[in-house]
Amino acid sequence: MTEMDPRMRRAVEAREAGRHDEALAVLLDIFAELDGPAGASGVSVFFTMFMWSQLVPDYVPAGEALAALRDEQVRKLLAGDERFGVDAGASPGYAHLRERFSVVVEMNEILGDPASTRAVFIELESRDPVRAARRSWQVLTALVECGDFVRADRYRGDPLQLLEGVNLDARTLPLLPPAGGAPRLAADMMNLTRDVRVGMAVLRGLGREEDAGALQAALLDGLEWPELRALAERELRAPGTINGEITAHRMAYEDGRGPD
């Protein structure tokens, strides 16, 4: 179990107390370290981005600052600097090597700017179609939100590809591990329902309403466990439900509390 970095705890306390400018200053410092040559020891990228997502809706300057950081990340990415963070000397779960494109996508999700994600992807697609195709799973939701159904249909693949694995894992894995382990089953459920939701949206966008309904039925009929069917229904009605549960689970361990 890890202890929250004192700076991040200060940011959390400042946001909760309404001192948004103080929380923003801490996040800016931490983010600069995360993308620096040494990383930010003891601070996870996950928790940092989660804190941004909490601050942006309540404090306009936080969104403006995040947009400026996003633009800088896009500039670095298109200039050929594709790695965010460090690749050595980091503890598991903390500052680590990751794709800069993934960071851009996450920032745009917080900002509610799918058009930016689509524009960056199209530029990358024009430069290296094969590599862009490998990244396409990260942008499908943004493409759908932008109404680019034809491009989304090109990349979406089989939306039920994870179904068999989810059913198999559900026989032995808890939805959310009690000891702070990786929530593999919940994550796979989130990915499965996302793929189905995107597939349904694409089919509807292409005028194939009947096929969209058949896809939803195939998901719900194919899940073997009532708990998972109910979770999938909730996720399809309110996207983000599963991610909220995963986030709450991870946050309990990020701040050293463990689950309630």
Image (spheres, rainbow, N blue to C red):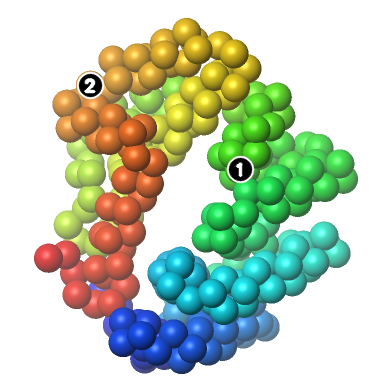
Residue 113 position by quadrant: bottom right
Tell us which disc is closer to us: 1 or 2: 1
> Percent from the top left, x then y, of residue 126?
86, 41
> Percent from the top left, x then y, of residue 237?
33, 34
> Percent from the top left, x then y, of residue 134?
67, 40
* Residue placed most toward the observer, 21 or 163: 21
Q: Considering only order in the chain, which callout, 2 or 1, is on the residue closer to the N terminus?
A: 1
Amino acid tagged 2? Glu
- Give the side of residue 20 with respect to residue 124, left or right: left
The residue tagged with tag 1: helix, strand or loop?
helix
- Give the side of residue 159 with respect to residue 220, left or right: right
Mark 1 vs 2: CB contact within 8 A: no
Mark 2 nearby-residue class (10 Å; few <14, some 14–19, many ≥20): some
The residue tagged with tag 2: helix, strand or loop?
loop
Q: Is residue 54 above or below residue 143?
A: below
Q: Residue at x 19, y 69 (%)?
A: 258
Residue 70 seen in the figure: yes
* Residue placed most toward the observer, 210 or 250: 210
Q: Residue at x 41, y 11 (%)?
A: 214
Residue 26 seen in the figure: no
Q: Is residue 122 above or below residue 7?
A: above
Q: Is residue 207 above or below residue 178?
A: above
Which residue sits furthest left?
260
In the rendered image, which residue does mark 2 sit on?
Answer: 224
Q: How many numbered circles are shown?
A: 2
Query: In which quadrant will I find the N terminus?
Result: bottom left
Query: In which quadrant will I find the C terminus?
Result: bottom left
- Give the side of residue 114 with respect to residue 237, left or right: right
In the rendered image, which residue does mark 1 sit on?
Answer: 142
